[in-house]
Image (cartoon, grey):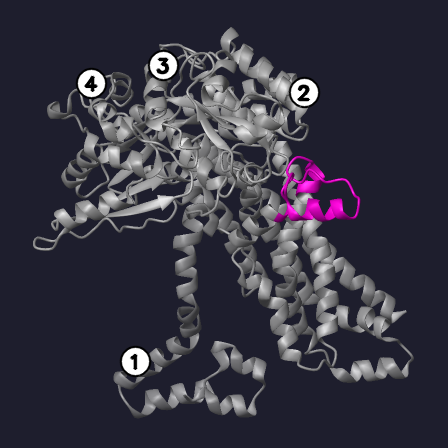
Amino acid sequence: MEALSHLTQEALVNRSTPRPARHVALAAVSALVLSLGLAACGGDADSDSDGGSADGPVEITIATFNEFGYEDLITEWNAANPDIQVTQKKVGTWDDAKENLYTKLAAGSGLSDIEAIEGDAMPAMLAESDAFVDLTDPELDGRWLDFKAAAATNADGQMIGYGTDAGPEGICYRSDLFKKAGLPTDRDEVAALMGTWDDYFATGEEFVSKVPGTAWYDSTGGTAQAMLNQVENPFEQSDNTVDVENPELEAVYATLTSNVEKGLSTQLTQWSDDWTASFQKDGFATMACPGWMLGVVSGNADGVEGWDFANVFPGGGGNWGGSFLVVPKQSEHPDEAKEFAAWITAPEQQVKAFQAIGAFPSQVEALQTPEVLDMTNEFFNNAPVGQILSDRAAAITVQPYKGPKYSDILQAFQAALVRVDDGSNTPEESWETFLSDVEQL
Amino acid sequence: MPHDVEVKTGDAAQAASPGSSSPDPHDVRLSARRTSGPRSAWRQRLSRWDVRFSPYVYISPFFILFLIVGMFPLVYTAVVSVYDWSLIGGKGEFVGLQNYRDVIENPYFLKSAVNTISIFLLSSVPQILMSLALAGLLDTALRGATIWRMGVLLPFVVAPVAVGIIFGSLFGDRYGLINEALGWVGLPSVAWHTDRLASHLAIATMVNWRWTGYNALILLAAMQSVPRDLYDAAAIDGANRFRQFTSITVPSIKPTVVFVVITSTIGGLQIFAEPRMFDSTLAQNGGSDRQFSTMTMLIYDFGWHLRDLGRASATAWLLFLLIIVIALGNYVLSRRFGTLTKARRRR
């Protein structure tokens, strides 16, 4: 999963610019020390994972980001399991969660008993397998879609994480803006317009020529994610050698940067305040929508009418995101944490999470249930989102290879696109910076 | 205590020095030895030790605490900086000064250093001038003085992160309030997050908003201790209010100005929360092209994004050295400025 907007913050933000002190010299010295301490200290260590004395209930925490749809499920578990009481800790975005995760992994304490991990970062977690509890359980064989299970399994065959949702993508679009541009508004007719990326962008050029001031897609970054998820080896070869100067990646980069000149992109950074605001300002007409994005759109575009969801994805299908739950070895109650993680990622529970926020289940059984298949979404003009996402999941042919550096390189690649979007670099300059950034990793 | 007596009669400075503080120590020692046995001598010695060492014991908690939370990280950071040291994996090979070389050769180092100094100048200089002016105004006979003085401190109460979020939104490139306001009066919008100087101005605005009132109160406290008869004398000599301010007020509060200058130097060079919160997403680190990445953000970038504590520590030490150099420079400058005004006054 990705993120909503960057609001609440953790450890790092507590460090402000210090000023007052008693005496000049002491002020100088102690403040200098603070500056050094910044590098040496490991962030706040909140240890609310204790409890569980011999007779009291075991208290465990689960840390999630964005929306997982777990609130009601946790209430349900707590009512049924007086011995294991679960509390949820939520942060705004995966970026927040990632910083917190690495800081506390380094500190060796302070993590929740269960941590949610964004799918693209899972390979990096597998590389740190020592820090996490082996969750392998023969009883759970076959619970998840093959690619989901494989993404959570390390080279030694240990399953480190339990899959939550998957991210099959469709296209969210504004039928009112389509109408304004003289384009068809019906879901199926829209789908016919964007079978390939070339078609999708060509329709976009037609659209922006008719509706000046509104872009075709929400962000270059989001579209890049969608395109990269159809590339077999976007950043790394299958032996984990970094290889970013490959023709597929260069083609994606060239296409997206040239789209900027054509006015197809909002030129906004995905997940920024301006990006969030653009949902309310007719900023764009379409966007790549994994299941979990539906909740983001309806939240950001609250009150905007005309959103719909088309059963199509340029280039076939693609999986964007979908998360995992891991249990850090720091946890004082790994067994209870594992038990709860297994329960909440079971098909029955993930179906309820889908109903709550639209996160499409990654569990084989859940995909067949009428609760998923018959689900419609009122905000998206009552689109049959369950059926559409199932079709989109079936259309996925490529699972990109994601090595341990995938998440970091992706971040650098997104930054490279933003530099072109905001005009601070030419595409060539930005590509050079990207190469040097990747070298630093 | 026996030495209280002497304080009353003797020179205060003499009384303060531990050796001379007992009343005629020679006499007492003699009489003690004469009248009673070793017990009393022991007591005498204790009493002398008390006088000599107590002050140090009383102030020692600060220094012991400082050694633990201050010196230790400082030294430890120096140790980490000469190793290949991963955030997760911990200590690796000894690499000598390689981390320092890597940091200095990193293209973002120079950029961050320049940004830091630029943001520091854009914030500290106007901030101290504004604080002085504000303190000067608050020092006049105002109705409801306390309310005004409390008022200037209000921005300081707001957490820097909250300031960052609010200002980040105000300074939005596309839909921010400031750009919309510029549009109303027909001015072109400013790319606050993309243009390097504009981003520095925006961040300096946050810093100034937060710290001007705080510094003004410190300066005001100093101003209130300036003897009022100096002003009366100056007024008789025909100096107007502005002349009184520059020739009497400012030179009289010089030590406090130096204090404010040095603390704001340190704070300014360590700036982190404001630029960090100014970023449009946390995945960035001081703008898409490091337009407003500062030195502390670079430390954070090395340590927590690249997960390389070795380079992070090396950067921390380089920042430490930079702060020392600039703080010393400021100190010299502030002193020079003091002596200049004094010289002018003598003339």
Chain under label 1? B
Please name which of the two marks, 3 or 4, marks the residue nearer to the observer. Answer: 3
- Give whichever of B107, B39 is nearer the camera: B107
Q: Confirm whether circles 3 and 4 share one chain.
A: yes
Name the spot of residue A13 as percent of width and height, x first: 47, 48
* Amino acid found under the numbered disc labelled 4: Gly
Q: Do the residues bearing badges 3 and 2 touch, measured as CB atoms within 8 Å?
A: no
Look at label 1 and name its amino acid: Trp
Read off the residue under disc 2.
A261
Q: Residues within 10 Å of mark 3 (few under 14, many from 20)?
A: some
Q: Nearer the viewer, mark 4 or mark 1?
A: 4
Query: Does the stretch in magenta take in B6?
Result: no
Q: Which secondary structure, mark 2?
A: helix
Amino acid identity at mark 3: Ile
* Label 2: how many Cα within 10 Å (few below 14, some 14–19, many 20+): few
- The residue lying at 56 percent from left, 89 percent from top is B10
What are the residue bounds of the magenta stretch?
Answer: B170-199
